Amino acid sequence: MGKWKELAGRVLDGVELTESEAMSILESPDEELLELLDAAYMIRHFYFKNKIKLNMIINTKSGLCPENCGYCAQSSISDAPVQKYRMVDKDTILKGAEQAFKLNAGTYCIVASGRGPSDKELDTVASAIREIKHRYGLKVCACLGILNPSQAGILKEAGVDRYNHNLNTSKNHHEEITTSHTYQDRVDTVELVKKSGISPCSGVIVGMKETKQDVVDMARSLKNLNADSIPVNFLHAIDGTPLEGVNELNPRYCLKVLCLMRFINPSKEIRISGGREVNLRSLQPLGLYPANSIFVGDYLTTAGQESTADHRMLEDLGFEIEFAKEEVKA
């Protein structure tokens, strides 16, 4: 048995990686990549077999955000030419859910720009979620920014299964990316939704001039948060943002990051998210050996791969789509 499979076996026995072991994954030579992926798949298969979760996102409010996140085309400091519109109406959200249903997406992700939702915006989303649950039985993930306890309760009552609030980067690197809110603000929001009985979804963006130690710290922070779903985004630098022109990633390193996330968070949903098409490129299929979830369709401000290509990729790999739909009410 090779060293990576031996390490995977120890993870399955409940042993946590040491700092040097975690770093060795990111620094592993490219010629060992297939062995590393095989070991990560050994962990993934133990918990998820050959199943893949599909997620679809809708951007219900674009731009107009007062935050200063350096990666985001929708932020107050961005000059990127993105669409700007206020919260869409309930029917638009429902049409997105219908599309998600047709694409066999198990989770429908309702996202809105901004620091947090207004009462009116929250009412629109909550009303739409109740209807989505009745019509389609989809799992619903909301991503509306920082919440207070009352807002979290409203979303829970409406039927939200999961709430996304990404850490985005490490605590050490946070102020290099944004100063309009703190790292602790993000942690507190994830803890709040957990207390409200909503499944926590929190992830990262890799490729924002962070160090490898920052990436290891991100993976451990998500483990400490006990995030059920971990979206791993790879920076797709957009012209007009402070990170314009940053291009630090290559497909092989991206695969090593996904392996690290699987080794440190063995039983969690690891989702390949924004930037997979431009960063993993021809190696996209290999990402599904450590990861067990992807987005289909477009992202917030960038285009994704055609859904037919995604479904064909899954079919070619021999993976089985995991339907997360509940029984639709009569």
Image (spheres, rainbow, N blue to C red):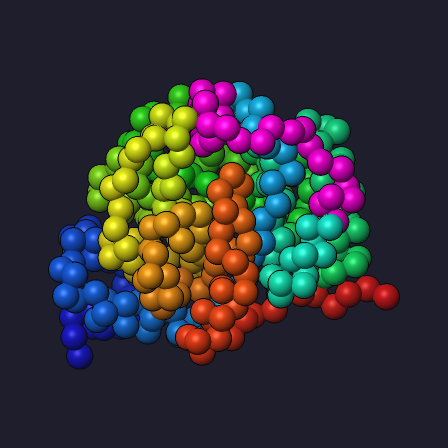
Residue 19 is situated, as x and y percent measured from the top left of the image, at 19, 50
Residue 287 visible to an observer of this rendering = no
- Which residue appears at 67% of the width and 63% of the height? 102
Q: In which quarter of the image is residue 282?
A: bottom left
Residue 87 is situated, as x and y percent measured from the top left of the image, at 69, 32
Q: Which of 108 and 99 is in front in this view?
A: 99
Q: Please say if 232 is above or below 118.
A: below
- Which residue appears at 41% of the width and 26% of the height? 240
Q: Report whether 194 appears left or right of 182.
A: right
Which quarter of the figure is the N terminus placed in?
Answer: bottom left
Q: Nearer the viewer, residue 69 or 62?
A: 62
Q: Report whether 188 appears left or right of 248.
A: right
Residue 161 is situated, as x and y percent measured from the top left of the image, at 63, 52
- Which residue appears at 68% of the width and 61% of the height? 101
Instruction: Give the overall secondary structure of the magenta segment.
Output: loop
**Residues rendered magenta in the picture:** 68-94
Is residue 69 covered in magenta? yes
Q: Please say if 176 is above or below 207.
A: above
Residue that extends furthest to the right in the rendered view of this protein? 330
Q: Report whether 281 appears left or right of 55.
A: left
Q: Nearer the viewer, residue 240 or 294?
A: 240
Which quarter of the figure is the C terminus placed in?
Answer: bottom right
Q: Which of 139 and 198 is in front in this view?
A: 139
- Which residue appears at 54% of the width and 71% of the height? 321
Residue 252 is situated, as x and y percent measured from the top left of the image, at 24, 57
Counting the numbered discs, the total is 0
